[in-house]
Image: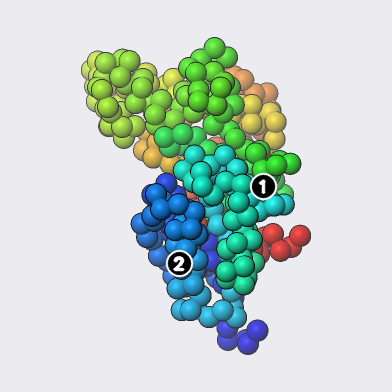
């Protein structure tokens, strides 16, 4: 490679409604980005075309020679060996099809698929709140709860790519039924959807967002009390889950991201108190174990996808 050429990778984040792509250099500097609506209803060929076209545009601009590879973050489980996506609610037509090899064939370059929450965890590890550690857990708090586990600087995937499903660990043994078949999953008790449901049950409002409930928690009086109760319950559920994670991993860092962070001051004290009650390991390492807010927001997955060609190439 000529000395003046910038080595870069392209990260792609295939979300629920749009496709984002970014060219990122080896130091984590974003050189370029695009965000496009994607024709998800158009089926497999339309989506593959959109991905390939977006990458081609960036490659033309920044030069094919410097391109180290492409990482693609997708919602769903990834069979790494085969390069397949399985069980993707948003992209059913991409399931059990050689997505990785097909994109790689059309572009003639290295392609790595990764689960979106795993990619976000990798992004935080690379240049976000986790840059100083090699081991961390990320929980993405949204309408559901996703999880990513980084151990020794690498994504922990499990033998068929299904590790890190932290939204579906049990926090209330006979709790709310979940679509996964379990009862009392973390995401049934601590996601944005759960906050909205609790607000409805407590007659705070029919369709309040977690932001609305966070705003209400600032108010004095009965409404504020109810909102603060909701965040206490949410924080305790998070604490149960995090206590288990601390006991399991003894990692130095547990990161939370997503639209619930504005309510941090209302749920975090309950979360940390519950962790102290339920985890000896947490009490014993209280000053060294950090529970913190992720810093890259919804860019984390883009950065994380982009760093994969370098991380995975190391073997
Ligand atoms: Zn579940």
Give the answer, above or below, for where 153 lies relative to 227.
below
The residue sitting at 26% across, 19% down in the picture is 204
- Across and down, in percent, residue 232 comes to 42, 21
Q: Secondary structure at mark 2?
A: helix
Which residue is situated farthest in the top direction here?
174
What residue would you read off at disc 2? Answer: 54
Graded by Cα atoms within 10 Å as few (under 14), some (14 to 19) or many (20 or more), the crowding at tag 2 reads: some
- Across and down, in percent, residue 224 comes to 27, 21
Quadrant position of the N terminus in the picture = bottom right
| Labelled disc at residue 79 | 1
Q: Picture quarter containing residue 308?
A: bottom right
Horizontal arrangement in the rendering, residue 77 relative to residue 34 (left or right): right
Quadrant position of the C terminus in the picture = bottom right
| Mark-to-mark CA distance, 2 and 1 | 24 Å
Give the answer, above or below, for where 21 lies relative to 131.
below
Give the answer, above or below, for where 304 lies relative to 198.
below
Q: Nearer the viewer, residue 139 or 130?
A: 139
Graded by Cα atoms within 10 Å as few (under 14), some (14 to 19) or many (20 or more), the crowding at tag 1 reads: many
């Amino acid at each position: 490679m000529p000395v003046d050429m910038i080595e870069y990778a392209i990260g792609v984040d295939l979300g629920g409604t749009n496709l984002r792509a970014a060219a990122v250099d080896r130091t984590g500097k974003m050189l370029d980005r695009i965000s496009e609506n994607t024709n998800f209803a158009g089926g497999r060929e339309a989506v593959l075309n959109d991905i390939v076209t977006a990458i081609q545009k960036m490659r033309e601009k920044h030069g094919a020679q410097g391109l180290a590879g492409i990482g693609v973050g997708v919602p769903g489980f990834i069979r790494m060996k085969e390069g397949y996506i399985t069980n993707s609610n948003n992209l059913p037509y991409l399931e059990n099809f050689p997505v990785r090899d097909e994109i790689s064939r059309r572009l003639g370059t290295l392609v790595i698929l990764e689960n979106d929450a795993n990619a976000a965890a990798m992004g935080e590890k690379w240049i976000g709140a986790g840059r100083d550690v090699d081991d961390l857990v990320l929980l993405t708090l949204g309408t559901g709860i996703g999880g990513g586990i980084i151990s020794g600087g690498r994504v922990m995937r499990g033998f068929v790519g299904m590790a890190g499903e932290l939204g579906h660990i049990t926090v209330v043994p006979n709790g709310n039924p979940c679509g996964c078949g379990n009862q009392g999953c973390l995401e049934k008790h601590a996601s944005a959807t759960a906050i909205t449901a609790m607000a409805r049950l407590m007659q705070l409002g029919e369709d309040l967002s977690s932001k609305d409930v966070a705003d209400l928690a600032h108010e004095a009086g009965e409404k504020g009390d109810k909102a603060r109760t909701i965040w206490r319950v949410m924080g305790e559920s998070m604490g149960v889950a995090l206590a288990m994670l601390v006991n399991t991993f003894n990692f130095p860092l547990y990161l939370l991201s997503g639209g619930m962070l504005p309510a941090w001051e209302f749920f975090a004290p309950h979360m940390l108190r519950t962790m102290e009650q339920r985890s000896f390991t947490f009490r014993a390492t209280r000053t060294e174990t950090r529970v913190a807010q992720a810093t890259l927001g919804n860019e984390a997955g883009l950065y994380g996808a982009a760093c994969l060609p370098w991380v995975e190439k190391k073997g």
